[in-house]
Amino acid sequence: MKEGFRQSMAWLHTWSGLLVCWVLLLVFCGGTASYYRNEITLWMQPELHAVAANPVSSEVAASAAQAAMSERAAGATRWFISLPDERTQATQLGWSKPSKPGEKKKGRRGNFHSEKTDPATGEVLSRPRDTRGGEFLYRLHFDLHYMSAIWARWIVGFCAMFMLVSIISGVITHKRIFKDLFTFRPKKGQRSWLDAHNVTAVLALPFHLMITYTGLVTLMFLYMPSGATAAYKGDQDTFFAEAFPRAPERKAAGVAAPLTPFAPLVRQAERQWGGKVERISVNAPGDAHAVITLSRSSGRDMSTRQPSMDFDGVTGKLLSSNGETLPGAAATQGVMVGLHVAHFGGPLLRALFFLSGLAGCAMVATGALLWAVKTRQKQAKALAAGKRASFGLRLVEALNIGAIAGIPIAFGAYFWANRLLPVVMEERPKEEIACFFGAWALAAIVAQLRPTRAMWRLQLTAGAILLAGLPILNVFTTSSHLGVTLFLGRGPVPVAAFDLVVLSLGLLLAYAAWKLKPLAAKAKKAAPSTTSSHVAGAA
Amino acid sequence: MEILSNFLVFALCYAGLSCLCLAMDRHYADLHGRGAEPPPQLRRRLQWGGALALVFALAWAMHIAGAGHGTVFWFGSLTGCGLLLIWLLPYAPHQAMRLARAVGVAALLAAIVLAVL
């Protein structure tokens, strides 16, 4: 090695980071939003805002769901029931019907029906507008869109691996990690960007390391199948059966028999677990061999692997109880995935995860900006002599605008579309998503055409108006705007919180745009993006 | 009670980080003028006090939320408090430190209330 270890690590950090930073920013933004996936979905279905808030016990909800299902889902092969909890007010019912002979298979969800019902009565809730809500943002952060999920996961996994490399080399190359722990010097150009990058990276370092590593772990069977493939000679099913044991499925007997009531089973399970039942699924309901499976809601521990109990569907006898003691590897994997998705946390922990996620967005964004600022500094002489910026610099600056200012625009457009598209519409979810990508593509292309300081200002302002405008748009399009949810204290809290969060993010973007006010004539030749503060945090 | 318990973790983290921060030359100088350095005895006291506050915060978080949740909570509150402190420092250093003092006293009171009840 010609150079020192630290220099080579600095090189690695710079390039492993720069190469994937724009995809990472999207993944971080989508992932951060996904912490509030249910709340976002609720916000995007204003028809459901009136329901909310009179919680019933799991037993009552289970009985109501059973009555509703017996009425509506007769002849289904499977039932799925998600009981309400603190974050979802409605009971979600789902069932799949057997496909008729000769009928073409309609894809994975072809014969699946689902609806949201009132937990107390089991009545179908006024049909909400069709949207993918927070689910889209969640999928976006590892499945991307408009491409096959497998390819997308490989791309995201590749970027995550680079991110891990980047984090570790970044820690090594950061000479004064403790000395500069509290250092942020605004209004100093490149210095400020470096400080902002360090601060957002180092302070949330445990989170960044955890989220990147566990993110890879969630898809480890895709990324690193060799171990299991070698040991099981390619027999994936046996591997999964042994690694994550489940009770064997019972075949339907073909003899009709009434289903036992859910309520006593729910009571029994909750007494044993000391936690709430979240999901009830029934295999072959109405058959003599029906099996009712109850799963515990997460929250008692960090794992995503929660215990479940199988009951005989006719007699109500406990058949087996799974997953209360997991083998070490499965338990570890469960906790890692659990840490990543953070379903275990209450509102406070979730807010901290969200904050750390925002710090992650800011870290990626400031890192990308830092490269541009530094490179522009290097070319300062040539630029001053009237030469044009190098191709690489121009490309990176344009991509930065398209990603850092463009992603908030895309998010804003998605939410605006949700409110402005006709409530009843063919393929409504698809149109909303088209708005997301349409707005983003527009932002990215325009940025490529003119990657200037004025463009930053324009796009940041657009993002600010879109996000901060949402609470105002709500006043005209829904009856659960801030005036009702906050000032009258009536509406669902998550809806009010959503409005407040987008409002503050919008204001942050507006502040960033304001900081970019046109330079005085004297400073006109300076770098186009030398404002201080963690401007990009808003992304 | 739960709010007070959670508040104690945040308060200890913020106060602890502020102590550690003030023990550094650069940030001491931010407050007391250019070139000022904390006297060695004060520096030691700040460092020990800060570290102890953070350790107590971790212990308390683990006590109220269990080892796993507690650790996650502690890291999260360190991140949150650290970001707040660093954001305040360059713009309003005196207010940041006044806040630290107030929060430190509040932490003490909260600890007493929680111990008595």
Image (cartoon, helix red, strand yellow):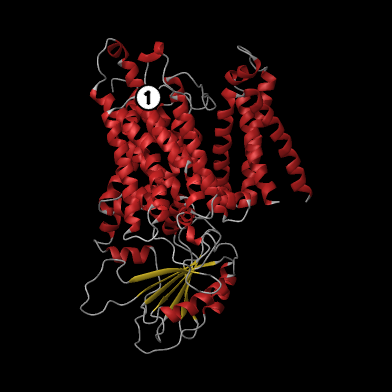
Q: Position of residue A359 (x, y in %)?
A: 47, 37
Residue A485 spot, x, y in % from top left: 58, 52
Please tell me in which quadrant of the rendered image residue A376 appears.
Answer: top left
Left or right, B7 with reference to A454: right
- Compare residues B52 and A77 and report the one nearer the observer: A77
The foreground one among A159 and A135 is A135
Q: Residue at x 50, y 35 (%)?
A: A507
Q: Is residue A164 left or right of residue B4?
A: left
- Choose top left, top right, bottom left or bottom right for residue B96: top right
Rendering coords of residue A526 (x, y %): 37, 15
Q: Nearer the viewer, residue A279 or A90?
A: A90
Residue A96 visible to the viewer: yes
In the picture, which quadrant includes the C terminus of chain A?
A: top left
Q: Chain of mark 1?
A: A
SS type, badge 1:
helix
Position of residue A345 relative to residue A307, above or below, is above
Residue A337 or residue A38, whichever sits in front:
A38
Task: Return the x and y of residue A84 as percentages of the image width and height.
Answer: 52, 65
Could one spot residue A319 in this view of the protein?
no
Q: In this picture, is A453 found above or below A229?
A: above
Query: Taking A213 as reference, is A116 above or below it?
Result: below
Could you tell me the amino acid type at mark 1?
Arg
- Mark 1, Cα crowd under 10 Å, few <14 / some 14-19 / many 20+, is some
The residue lying furthest to the right in this view is B116
Label 1 belongs to which residue?
A6
State the residue lying farthest toward the front. Answer: A476
Total marks placed: 1
* Residue sitting at x 55%, y 77%: A263
Which quadrant holds the N terminus of chain A?
Answer: top left
